[in-house]
Image (cartoon, rainbow, N blue to C red):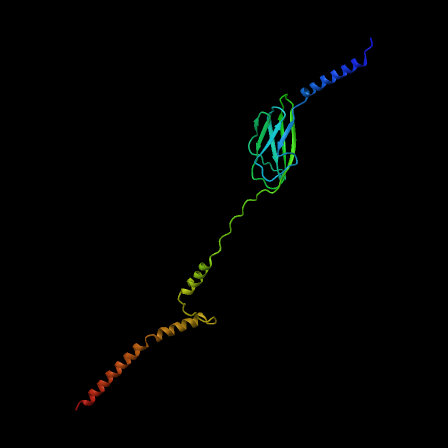
Amino acid sequence: MKRSPLAALTAILAALLVLGTAAPALAHDALKSSSPAKGAEVDALDEVRLEFTNKVRMPFVIVRGPGDAQVQSGKPELDGAVVRQAVKGPLPDGKYTIAYRVVSSDGHPIEGEIPFRVKGAETPPASPSPESPSPEASQSAAASPSPEASAPASAPSAPAGQTSLEADEVSSAQDVSFPVWLIVVIGALVGIGIGFLLSARRSKP
C-alpha cells in the first residue's frame, strides 16, 4: 500500500508536535534568575536572592568573599521557588561567589556558582582624634606657674669638688659661730664687774 506525500508529511508534523509538547515535561527545574546577577557589580548587599523555575527544597547557599571568607549569615529562607540568604554587611570591595545547591521538584539536584563584585562600598568612619587645646586654654596654661617654678628655691648645695669631711667642717664652723653675740655680752658683763671692783677698791681710805 502506497502512501501519498501529503500523508507522510502529516505524520511527520504530528510526531514533531508530540515531541515538542513532551520535551518541557521531561526538562528538569533550573535557576531562573539571581540577585545579584552573574557578573554584576554592586556597592552594597544585604541578601542573596535565587529564583528557580519551580518549587525547590533543601536549599544550601554559601557566599565566599576575598580570601575565601564566608560572609553568609544564618540559614537560607525558602519560599516556594525563591531562596533568600542573608549576608554579613557591610561587605568590603572585592570579588565574591554565590555557591548554591537545591533539590528540584522531581528530586533532581541543582547546583552552581554565581560570581559578582562589590565596588564602591562605604568605608567605616575613622575614630576621632583627640581635640587640640583651644588658644585660650594654651594661654591660661602658659600664664599659670608650674609647680616647679612656684616652689621656693632650695638652699645652695655644696660645690661638686667638696668632700663630705669639708662639708662637716663648714657645718661645725657655722654651729660655733652662731652664739658669738652671747660670748660678747658675757665678756662685757665681766668687764663691767671688774671695773666696779677696781673702782670700789680705789675709793676706800
In the rendered image, residue 8, in percent from the top left (x then y), is placed at 79, 14
In the rendered image, residue 186, in percent from the top left (x then y), is placed at 28, 79
Location of the N terminus (image quadrant): top right
Q: Residue furthest bottom?
A: 205
Number of numbered discs visible in the structure rendering: 0
Q: Which quadrant of the view contains residue 68? A: top right
Looking at the image, residue 159 lies above or below residue 99: below
Q: Residue furthest right?
A: 2
- For the point 31% across and 77% down, the residue is 181
Query: Which is nearer the eye, 22 or 149?
Result: 22
Q: Which quadrant of the view contains residue 61? A: top right
Q: Which quadrant of the view contains residue 120? A: top right
Looking at the image, residue 183 lies above or below residue 6: below
In the rendered image, residue 139, in percent from the top left (x then y), is placed at 45, 61
In the rendered image, residue 126, in percent from the top left (x then y), is placed at 54, 48
Left/right of residue 155 with respect to residue 184 in the rendered view: right
Query: Which is nearer the eye, 154 or 151?
Result: 151
Q: Residue furthest top?
A: 1
Left/right of residue 21 with respect to residue 7 in the rendered view: left
Looking at the image, residue 130 lies above or below residue 100: below
Left/right of residue 49 with respect to residue 156 in the rendered view: right
Query: Which is nearer the eye, 124 or 4?
Result: 4
Q: Residue furthest front?
A: 6
